[in-house]
Amino acid sequence: MISVFIPHWFTRFDIMIELFSFLVLLTFFIMSIRNYKLTENKKLFYLGLGFLFIALAEIATILTKFVIYYKTTLFQVVGGVVLKYDILKASDISYDLGFFLYKFLTLAGLYVIYRLPLNDKNIGDIVLAGFFILLSSLAGQFIFFIFHLTVLLFLVLIIDTYLKVYKKNKSCKTKLLLIAFSILTASHLIFLLQGLPQLYIIGQIMQLISYLTLLVLVIKINKNENSKRK
């Protein structure tokens, strides 16, 4: 189990940020699926799927904030007398499970979003990427920077890929997506370098801003959809 630098007083706000992030990402998923049904564009389906994975990752990380207690029996010999007593111990199960799911789902979601604009769909590349995602998720249980380093790599690739898309279509929506991912990249860079509680707070706030940018994008998509219906 690794230690994450989260100030105790910030835990409640941390959970609120993660819940808000989940709702924004879930809304993005719903909007993508709704547009996919209207246009039958499979790219919208996979875009929504990528954000759904990241949304579920936000729920998984909330699990790490809760502790499960279990009863265990201890025996102790005192002066030739065996004493038996029950105690409550904290379990790391919820933390380890939530921590693993958060990492695996985040990396899987980012990989889906990264692969989306690419035309070549090599099954070998997908299997290889899946292996490294699983490896990074498992290694991240002990060495936290491996996960953030992998996330940063995916985010840089995503920004590079969607920057090329933006140069072609000059779409405001693509621009907002780029801004959101750029802020998200900065937040994970801070997480990678974190050593003080204040850095974790700054990273979480920047991640919140990135999801607020996504919320603006969702609102714009919804407005365009309503305009088309009218």
Image: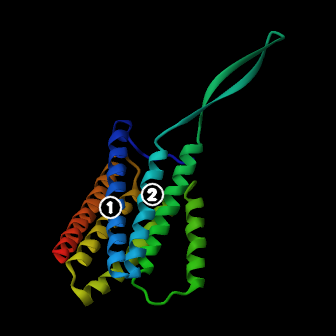
Packing grade of label 2 (10 A; few <14, some 14-19, many >=20) is: many
- The kind of residue tagged 1 is Thr
Closer to the camera in the image, 201 or 19: 19
Q: Which quadrant is home to the C terminus?
A: bottom left
Q: Amino acid at mark 2?
A: Leu
- What residue lies at 30% left-to-right and 85% top-to-bottom? 165
Residue 157: image x %, image y %? Answer: 40, 78
Residue 225 can be seen in this image: yes
Quarter occupied by residue 142:
bottom right
Going from N to C along the chain, the mark reached first, 1 or 2, is 1
Residue 30 in picture, x, y percent from top left: 35, 65
Instruction: Return the x and y of residue 176 as percentages of the image width and height.
Output: 24, 72
Residue at 32%, 52% in the rendered image: 20
Q: Are marks 1 and 2 in contact (CB under 8 Å)?
A: no
Residue 90: x and y in percent read 58, 34
Mark 1 or mark 2, which is nearer to you? 1
Residue extending furthest toward the right: 80
Query: How busy is the neighbourhood of tag 1: few (under 14 within 10 Å), some, or many (20 plus)?
Result: many
Q: Confirm whether residue 144 shows in the render.
A: no
- Which residue carries the number 2 mark? 56
List the residue tagged with mark 1: 27
Q: Residue furthest front?
A: 230
Q: Residue 218, located in which quarter of the rendered image? A: bottom left
The disc label shown at residue 167, or none? none
Q: SS class of the residue under badge 1?
A: helix
Seen in the picture, residue 50 relative to 59 is either above or below; the reply is below
